[in-house]
Image (cartoon, rainbow, N blue to C red):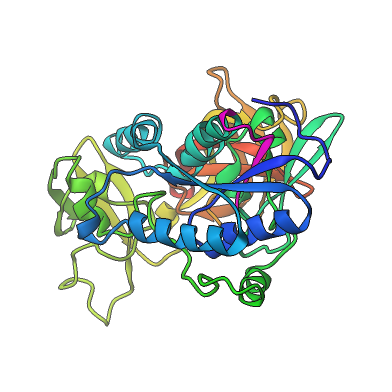
């Protein structure tokens, strides 16, 4: 990877063009700033296009229209093997371990800012750019990942696994724009995808009936659905298919009538293969005062201060920042204590740390310290 790109406007930038409006406007803004801009479309999943789930062909067509409109060259590449080996295999391992992984963060680290970056540098680029909503600043201490202007769209949560080399060679042209402003620019310059719906679903796999998709790779292992008191409510299809805090798709419609409070997944008891549900979103079994984390990653390459230290964190995208204390553990992990109880702390998801608007890094949630067990 190259060192931090210079500020010269003669640099050659390759934009990851997805077919969506964000990356299209990012490319346009770089052209306006005087950069030499090309684009690259990545296909990362060898799906059956006839299934209608992952519209890679449609997205590629949109990317070509954008590139033609902007007058830039469009490269294409297939990273399906890299995606399977580096992202999807880990995704399945986490579900097999009864956890709920964060594939978007891993995809950014391994594909969008590794495989793509390496490929772009091989094409002669000085740096890459994407349509992510985030901000990067550079100083003598290194590269810093910062919150962007649009708090609703900020994507630093999904970028927390990046390192110094990746950030030094990456540009985020949308850092000071809101989504509404991005769409307005797209309309103003006549981009056909100005109103295109934002992509959702698993990174590069698209929108699917998730349980049916996961069942193609993990066996169904039915077991009892119970209350904490041991009352049977029904049968689950396999603990891997459920997430802590989940309310929809529990298969107990005959039990959870309109007269009753909603039910939520609170515990996945792997030893008994039992799914424990509770009522009310603030049930003690759903509330945690802290957690243990695995594989902490610091963007700077090291923690921002001697542990323990105080900072803020979020447990999910768009969650307001929560005050906390971060401690180290002898096994190389971390522990986090919150000032306020946190709902639905989910093993496998990411906890991401912030201080003064800067994303410091994060860790994989291993276990929430449930308030009811105090």
Q: Quadrant of residue 174?
A: bottom right
- Return the residue nearer the eye: 298 or 86: 86
Q: Residue furthest top?
A: 330
Q: Quadrant of residue 194?
A: bottom right
Identify whether 167 is placed above or below 2.
Answer: below
Point 52% across, 40% down: residue:
112
Point 39% across, 35% down: residue:
87
Identify whether 369 is placed above or below 183.
Answer: above
Q: Which residues are magenta?
A: 122-131
User: Magenta residues: mostly which secondary structure?
Assistant: loop
Point 35% across, 54% down: residue:
56
105 sits to left or right of 208: right
276 sits to left or right of 311: left
Identify whether 211 is placed above or below 216.
Answer: below
Instruction: Return the x and y of residue 230 as percentages of the image width and height.
Output: 20, 53
Q: Any magenta on residue 125?
A: yes
């Amino acid at each position: 990877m190259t060192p931090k790109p210079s500020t010269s406007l003669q640099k050659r930038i390759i934009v990851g063009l997805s077919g969506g409006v964000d990356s299209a406007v990012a490319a346009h803004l770089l052209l306006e700033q005087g950069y030499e801009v090309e684009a690259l479309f990545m296909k990362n999943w060898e799906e059956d296009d006839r299934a209608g789930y992952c519209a890679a062909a449609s997205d590629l067509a949109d990317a070509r229209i954008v590139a033609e409109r902007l007058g830039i060259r469009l490269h294409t590449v297939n990273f399906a093997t890299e995606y399977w080996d580096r992202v999807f295999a880990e995704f399945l391992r986490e579900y097999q371990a009864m956890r709920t992984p964060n594939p978007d963060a891993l995809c950014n680290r391994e594909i969008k800012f590794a495989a793509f970056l390496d490929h772009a540098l091989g094409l002669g680029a000085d740096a890459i750019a994407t349509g992510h909503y985030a901000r990067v600043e550079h100083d003598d201490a290194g590269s810093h990942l910062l919150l962007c202007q649009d708090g609703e769209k900020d994507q630093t949560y999904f970028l927390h696994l990046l390192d110094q080399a990746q950030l030094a060679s990456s540009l985020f042209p949308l850092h000071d724009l809101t989504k509404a402003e991005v769409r307005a620019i797209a309309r103003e310059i006549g981009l056909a995808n100005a109103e295109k719906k934002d992509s959702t679903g698993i990174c590069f796999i698209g929108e699917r009936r998730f349980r049916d998709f996961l069942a193609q790779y993990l066996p169904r292992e039915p077991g009892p659905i119970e209350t904490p008191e041991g009352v049977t409510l029904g049968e689950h299809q396999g603990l891997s298919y459920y997430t802590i805090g989940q309310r929809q798709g529990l298969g107990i419609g005959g039990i959870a009538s309109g007269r009753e409070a909603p039910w939520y997944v609170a515990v996945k008891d792997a030893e008994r293969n039992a799914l424990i549900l509770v009522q009310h979103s603030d049930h003690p079994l759903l509330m945690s005062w802290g957690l243990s984390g695995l594989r902490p990653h610091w963007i700077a390459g090291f923690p921002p201060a001697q542990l323990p230290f105080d900072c803020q964190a979020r447990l999910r995208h768009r969650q307001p920042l929560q005050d906390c204390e971060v401690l180290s553990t002898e096994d190389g992990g971390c522990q986090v204590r919150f000032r306020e109880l946190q709902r639905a702390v989910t093993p496998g998801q990411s906890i991401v740390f912030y201080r003064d608007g800067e994303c410091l890094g994060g860790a994989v949630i291993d276990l929430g310290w449930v308030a009811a067990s105090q």
